[in-house]
Structures are given as structure tokens and as C-alpha cells.
Image: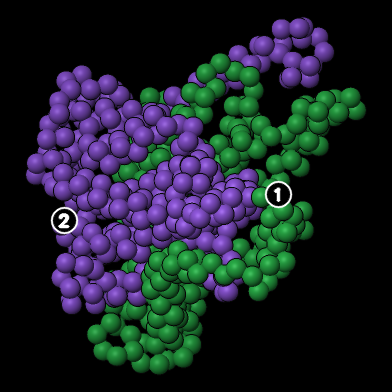
Amino acid sequence: MASLTLLRPGGRGGRARRGGRVDKVAYLLVAPAMLLTGLFFFVPMVLSLYWSFNSYNGLQPPQWVAGSNYADLAMDPSFRHAVKNSVVFTVVTMLIGPALGLVSALLLNRRIWARSFFRSVFFLPVTLSLVVVGTMWKILLAENGLANQALGLVGISGRAWLDDPSTSLAAVSLASIWQGFGFETVIFLAALQTISADLYEAARMDGAGPFQSFKAVTLPSLRPTVFFVYVVGVIGALQAFDQMYVMTSGGPLGSTTTVVFYLVQRFQAFDLGHASAAAYLLVVVLAVVSAAQLRLSKRLS
Amino acid sequence: MSGRFSLPGRGPSAGSQRHTGTFLVLCVASVVLLLPVVWTISTSLKSSADVFSPGLGLIPWHPTLDAYRGVFGSVPFARYLFNSVVVTTAIVALNVGLDSCAAYAFAKLRFPGRSLLFGLLLTTLMIPMQVNLIPLYRMMVWVHIRVPALGADTLSGIIAPSAVQVFGIFLMRQFFASIPDALIEAARLDGASELAILRRVILPIARPGLATLTIFTLLQSWNDFLWPLIVSGSDASRTLPVGLALLSSKNTVNWPETMAGSVVTALPMVLIFVVLQRQFIEGLTAGSGKDL
């Protein structure tokens, strides 16, 4: 066994064994995964790309229209509104969610009684489906729901938050932050616990106060985690759909119609060309976000 | 630690005081966080007439299970629950089996085309599922017309596109890669087949990875909404989230029933979370520490 290991330096040694063993069984093992991914991912991806350059209602054969679906989208006020809503939703939830998560993680990282209980409380909403969360908050934020009853106790008269275009997106964002920030809390907490106490000790030796050591030790150590949280969060937020579907059906007046919501609407209106074009625009945006993340994380390491 | 950082003149007890402060802040935060949950459960236990009684309504003074009877009687929540259980069980089982097999091959076996195939899988991680939504639906309709038992508006139509997850393959590949080759080599010298090696040597070591994959897939498929919504056309194939969304849009007056539906949809995952907290949190934060 020892000699076998020696033959393959580092235990990997693909190059050292070139021309050696070929594990034919590997094809059998990867076949189901490759076939299913091909059938349910690559085939639809190609179809969708093709349809995005066609006028297609799903009944008559597609008709080539080159880039005019994309041009239509760029000019369509309701698509532009949807893009704006998706961006606002992403910015709002990504400004507040991770900040809340970081603060909660810093609090939970102290030596306190019942810490794991608190951690579970913060994490509980993450296990709920967005449909459940949307349903709960839709009733909670209704004109005579819990939120307005509580506001009434302190003398503030509420309103039907979800029926008002000026507050609907904020209300949906609030529900989404409530559901999601426990995820960020737990990730930040895990990262905080890997920071060595020696670093804080060294900072203290240098005469750093709590704020300075947070800036000099905690924040730099958390940088990769912050990136992870933002990449996962931004990509998720740009695809938001479920909570809007349940809470507002994209309304009122399109004030909570996101890009994915728009895409589903076009699909239900048998306008597969524009729906596919909208989907591909989403792909481009997400690819840019992923690529930017990759470059940033490379520059950091 | 923060005691040492305390401002001068605050005395030695400042540190512990501050932790008491932290504790109190966390208590208040927990209450605020849990209020919506308490209110939901409380409302589900009320009769319609009691919902608007004065006060915040956090306590159901005349608790009744009428709403739950309604949800399992006039609304087919039993059917949705059954569908959700079948769909989730199938998706978890398929992923544990198929993702692990592929991951093992990519981590430990040598074959021409390995990096090409793996690279192909890599690209799918950057593409959102919504791109495939419409073609997938049309494919499922196409199948359903030819084989009525499969495709659109059947559970198979919900399960099939989630039978393999590229993320699951990546996750398991990391676990498999950490197993020493020497161990596998020894089993191979003993004449064990690759499948036997996978079953008797690798899987026992990769168990934490499998737990992570199981929990991740479990939560994701139980809570999945957009695809089941698109592909299910009737109660025969609606899962709990789809059924709940339908109930919530149709039923704007009967709050207890809508809330009972929410509780039924959420409860299974909450129970699993309460029992398996540590594994659950690890499962859902998998990948945060490492670059995939």
C-alpha cells in the first residue's frame, strides 16, 4: 500500500498515471446525472435561447424576429418597471438583511446564557417556505391585522400596507428580510467563531479599543463571508417571485412586479418570445454578478 | 473579553452588565421575531368570529380546531400533504443516490472527459432555473399527451427536473475528495468492485456529507414553489405551498383557515429543524466557508 501511494505523489497524480487505468464504471456513475442535466437543463436552455429570437405563442410554429423581442423589452414600460422593482427590492433587502445578520451574530458571539436557543429562534424563519411567510405577513399587514393593531396601541393609525403602491414593495421587503436574515446571522456567527482570540489579544496589546479592534480584526476576517452572503443574497433577491405572488400578485399597479414575475406573466399570456428574452436578460445580469464576485474574491486572496 | 474593553470608571462589573444587556436585547429581539409565528398559530386556533375580538389577539381564548377541520375537509390539504411527502421523499432519495454516484466518479475515478463533463456541470450553477421554466413546461406537456401518467400535472413532472442537483454533486465531491486514496486502493487490491467500494468504504465516511445533502434537498424541495406552481394544473398534483397559495388567494375572509393551512405547510420542516438543529444549520450553510 505504501508503494502504491509513493507511485502517486500527493495522492492525486492524474498526470503521473497518464495512459494507466481508466475506470469505465465512472461513465455508468455519471450517466444519470449527465443525462438528466442535459435533458432538463441544457435542452431547455437552448430552446429558450432560440425562442427569445422568435415570435412564438406555443401553438403556431415560431417565427424568427431576430433581436426585436429584446428591443421591445427595452422599450416596454412595464418591463422597465419590473427591473426597477427587482433592483429596489435587491438593494433594500441586501442593505438591511446582512447588516441585521451581522449585528445579531456579534450579539450571539458573546458569552451569554441560552445562546443556542437564541440562534435557533433567529434561524427558525429560514425553515419556512416563502409561501408560508407571504401568507402570514399578508394577513399580519392587512388593514385590521396584527401590525396595525400594535401600531394603534401606540397611537399610530396604520393603513392597508399592501394595497398602497407607495408601501407595497417595502412591506414585501420587510417580510423577506424577516424570513432571510437568520441565514446571514448563522453564517456570520460561524465565521466569527473561527477568528483566533490571539488576533484580538494582539490588537489589545497595540492599545486598540473595541471599535478599533472591530475595524482592524473582525471586519477583515469576515471579508470572504461578506462576499458569500452578498453573492448568494443578490442572486436570490434578483430572482424573487414567491412572496410577491402570494402577498400582492405583483400589484397594486405593478408596484411589486419583479423580473421573474413579469416573465411568468408573459408566459401565461402565451407570449413565449418575450418571456424567453426576459429570462435571458436575467441570465446575463446574474452572470455579470457571478463574474464580478469571482474577480473580487480572486483579488482578495 | 469586552469587560477588558470597558470604559474607565465603570468598575469591574461593567463587563458582566454588558452581557446582561446583550441577553435582554436578544430576549426582546426574539419576542419581536416570534410574534408573527405566535399570532399565526393563535389565529389558526380561533373561530372566524373570534378573530377580530379586541386586543392583539395573541391568545386564542376559545381555542377550536375548526380551521384545521376545514383545511382537511372542504379544502384538499390532505391531498396536498400527501403530494408534498411523495415529491420530497422522491427528490431526496434520487439526489442522495444520483448526486453521490456522480460525485464519487468525479472525485475518485479516472476517465477521459472527466474535466469536460465536470466543467459542463459547473456552468449550470450560474444559470437561474427560470430560464428553463417555459421549455420545461412545454416538454412536460409533450410527455403528458403521449403518456398521461407522466409529465405535466403529475407528480413525476414536479420530481423529474429536481432528480439531480449540480450543487449536490459539488458538495459530495468535496466530501469524497477528502477521503484518502490509499483506503480505496486497499479495497481495490482486495478485489472489491467500484460499487462495493462506494458502498462499504466511501459512504460510511461520507455520512456527514450525506446528512448535509439530505437536509439541504429536503428543505428546498418541500418549500419549492415556482416550478410546482407552473407544472401542476389540478389538485391531483398540487403540493402544499401551491395549495396554500391558492387557498390564500381565494380565501380572503376566513383567516383561521388560511393560517391553519400555513401551519400545516410549515410544521413538518419546523419539527425536523427542532429535532436536528445542528445538522440543519450546517446543512443550510454548507459551502459558505469554502470556495466551490
- In the rendering, at what x and y percent does residue A149 appear? 33, 30
Q: Secondary structure at mark 2?
A: loop
Q: Along the line of sight, which residue is nearer the eye, B284 or A166?
A: B284
- Judge whether B120 appears above or below B63 on screen: below
- Judge whether A279 appears above or below B166 on screen: below
Which three-letter amino acid code belongs to the residue tagged 1? Ala
> Which residue is under mark 1?
A2
- In the rendering, at what x and y percent does residue A44 appear? 39, 75
Which residue is rendered at x = 18% and y = 22% of the image?
B63
Q: Which chain is green?
A: A
> Which residue is under mark 2?
B235
Which three-letter amino acid code belongs to the residue tagged 2? Asp
Chain of the residue where label 1 is placed in the rendered structure: A
Q: Is residue B6 left or right of residue B35?
A: right
Q: Secondary structure at mark 1?
A: helix
Q: Residues within 10 Å of mark 1 (few under 14, many from 20)?
A: few
Which numbered disc covers residue A217? none
Q: Is residue A4 left or right of residue B189?
A: right
